[in-house]
Image (tube, rainbow, N blue to C red):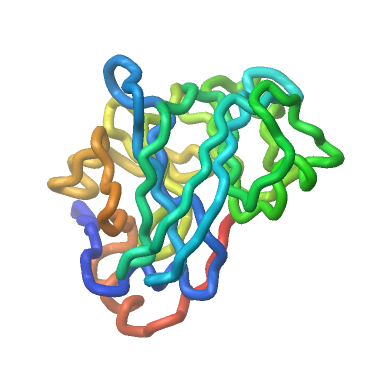
Amino acid sequence: MKTIFAIVAAAGAASVVSAGALPLINEVQPNQPGSDPATQQFEILGTAGASFSAVLYEIDTDFFPGTVDRIETISGTFDANGLFVANIADLENPSASYILASGGSAMLGDVFDTVNFGTQFGTIYDAVNTPDRVADIPNSVIPFTGGSDLAYIGSEPILIQRDSITGEWLQVNFAGDIFDAAGNNLGNAADLVPGYDPFTGSFGGVNFTLVPAPAALAVLGMGGLVAGRRRR
């Protein structure tokens, strides 16, 4: 029997993951379909109604140690679901590590400092790495900064996002297949999440969850059972 998952749009759904957490990277398109656009969206998860300011650094990890390839200053107020969508310059395609931090001395072209990265980036709120080939996996900054190291899924992901209930990272490839952070193929989006378009994502809306729909509603009803879950 096919298990159908859901986009949980109930009020407060995002806050199940975000309660008490620092700002987290929530949804990114590492390589958008088609030609590279001038700008793209980058979603951050935080405390509903709170104001924030952060700096996004993209580290090119096609080699080790990587270099700072993009720097974006982001500020705003999280909406009622704890979401903020920033419009930023198009990111370089993977392999890449994304670091969300308070800001430091790093400038474009700087080499990632495996010892003094705290000076380069300031307080690191969250980080995630996406490889586009097996050989680039060891180039990730995550062993130094902390955060989430996503497995190689056979190609660059077109989309990465957190499950709105568990907070775990999910990856989508060009065929619409959904993978977990460890690289396990969970099935195609058309079958798992009917009506969801993985090529555009859900920026500004609550992400889908792969917790079966009845269980997802039960988790929401139980309040903070998974509140404060940060990262894997």
Quadrant position of residue 221: bottom left
| Vertical relation: 189 (above or below) 64 | below
In this view, the residue farthest toward the bottom is 222
Say which of 6 and 115 sits in front: 115
x and y percentages locating residue 105 in the rendered image = 73, 39
Q: Is residue 180 left or right of residue 216?
A: right
x and y percentages locating residue 61 in the rendered image = 64, 25
In this view, the residue farthest toward the left is 195
The residue that appears at 82% across and 36% down in the rendered structure is 114
Whether residue 172 is visible here, answered yes or no, is no
Say which of 141 and 36 sits in front: 36
| Vertical relation: 12 (above or below) 35 | below
Say which of 102 and 160 sits in front: 102
The residue that appears at 70% across and 36% down in the rendered structure is 141
x and y percentages locating residue 99 in the rendered image = 60, 43
Considering the image in quadrants, where does the N terminus appear?
bottom left
The residue that appears at 47% across and 74% down in the rendered structure is 19
The residue that appears at 38% across and 34% down in the rendered structure is 29
In this view, the residue farthest toward the right is 115
Say which of 227 and 203 sits in front: 203
Whether residue 106 is visible here, answered yes or no, is yes
